[in-house]
Image (cartoon, helix red, strand yellow):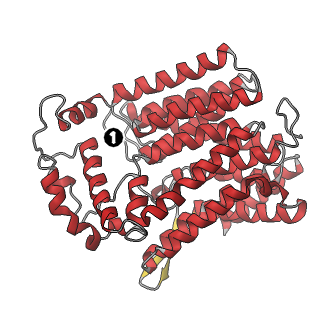
Amino acid sequence: MAVAETLTLRARSMARAGIGPGAAALSLAVPFLFLHIKYQPGVRVPLGSTHLGLELSDAAVVVVGLLALREGVRAGFAPLRPALPLWIASVALILWIFIRSGSLVHLVTAAKFSEYALLAFSAPLILRRRTDWELVAAATVAWSVVATCFGLLQFLGVHMADAWAAGRRQPSFLGHSDFAALSALALGIGLAAVLLASRRVGWAGVASGGLGLILSGATAGLIGIAAGTAAFLYAVSRRRRLAVRDVAVSGVVAVVVAAGVLVLRAGDFEHFLRFVHLKGRETQTANIQTYSHHALLAYIGYRIWRDHPLVGAGWQASTNPGVVDPQLPAARKKFPDVSPLAFPTRDHEWGIQNAYVQAAADLGLIGLVIWLAPFALALVLAFRANAPPGAVAAFTILSAMGIWGGQGLVAGIPLDAATWLGFGLAATAVAQRSQAAPQGKWPR
């Protein structure tokens, strides 16, 4: 409650300075949304046979949602109307997750996952002016700078939080995939500031976002970054003619990020080449190798989906021993050279670690289509818009889609926040399209 009251009071203070209270609350919520749960104080509320975990990030999301509701009542809910298909698809996803939740434990995680959807619904209501969006963008870049500096110190050998060995990829204070998600969002903001608004301060977002992506070493995000860069340039072309500088800056940044990640993960790539028999043959070791492990878990997810093709095994069922164990004999036969530690056990259910495979395994073909629908619709909205967040939304959404390729569906993580914020920015941009001048400027 103290956190909620603090956020509300600071939001009101910023409102007196000409900034909407909702935008102020969202900017103040950024550090909580992009912080690993283990570093957040929280409470555990008993709930039947399980418990409900409430962290600072939950309070932040609720405050933002309440202020968005207040803004809608005060100024109207018209900004939500242009993105109606996105809202329908998002609600359908949430409903299907609840329908396919087979236990109280899974209902709790479904509620937690759905809670972050408030960020998407809130964005068009609270980011009505350019100053509102710029404040949130500045807060995101500032937090990215902090996260990247933290990760850089870990890379140099300072043992903080869950630092990996010096010289290896680092989690910062988020986790590898979540660090990549924050960095991608900051990079998109930085590129938009530099190329669309001609603001030198945008280079802070480009530098912190690019370096953060390298330090996170999230190779699953590289495809997303490449696609996001192309989408960003397309969104820019919808507002004005592309210049050589646009292509050069975006291309160089994407190449540098890709090169940095590939160098940092060279050892893992060598193991993967051995795993697919392109460079010798992988021999069984006691160590878990990243890419063979992901391939193993994806195969288990595929077999779960094959047994439940239409509606899936149930939300988060791919972590249940009763669902996973029957697939293990076939998996061991398929992957004889993979470390025994890589296989799920009742003491350590690894999960699928690929959101798309997990969506199919847990939610079936129906769920996979519903999971992908908000991404597709948000991209359409981002491409239609000519307001500033459109290009950032396109970059963020596709980057997140890439990162989800190496991350399972986990409720309440920063990648959830980045994804729903990307949807919200797309809706915000298309809502402002009719109000924006041809140059794409918002009302102040």
The amino acid type, in three-letter code, at marker 1 is: Trp
Query: Residue placed at 71% from the left, 59% from the top?
Result: 64
Q: Residue 288: x percent and y percent?
A: 21, 46
Picture quadrant where residue 158 is located: top left
- Left or right of residue 400: residue 354: left
- Residue 345's place in the image compared with 258, above or below, is below
Query: Residue placed at 79% from the left, 45% from the top?
Result: 132
Query: Residue placed at 63% from the left, 37% from the top?
Result: 141
Query: Residue placed at 37% from the left, 47% from the top?
Result: 162
Of the 4 image quadrants, the one containing the N terminus is bottom right
- Residue 137's place in the image compared with 355, above or below, is above
The one nearer the camera, 3 or 51, is 51
Name the outermost residue toward the bottom. 48
The one nearer the camera, 178 or 271, is 271
Q: Which residue position holds label 1?
A: 164
Q: How crowded is mark 1: few (under 14 residues within 10 Å), some or many (20 or more)?
A: some
- Left or right of residue 255: residue 136: right
Q: How many marks?
A: 1
- Residue 102's place in the image compared with 211, above or below, is below
Of the 4 image quadrants, the one containing the C terminus is top right
Q: Can residue 364 be seen in this view?
A: yes
Q: Residue 296: x percent and y percent?
A: 25, 51
The one nearer the camera, 304 or 102, is 304
- Residue 330's place in the image compared with 377, above or below, is below
Q: In the structure shown, which secondary structural element does the residue marked by tag 1 occupy?
A: loop
Q: Residue 129: x percent and y percent?
A: 84, 44
- Left or right of residue 228: residue 20: right
Q: Residue 257: x percent and y percent?
A: 47, 26
Q: Is residue 54 visible?
A: no
- Left or right of residue 368: residue 230: right
Picture quadrant where residue 233 is located: top right
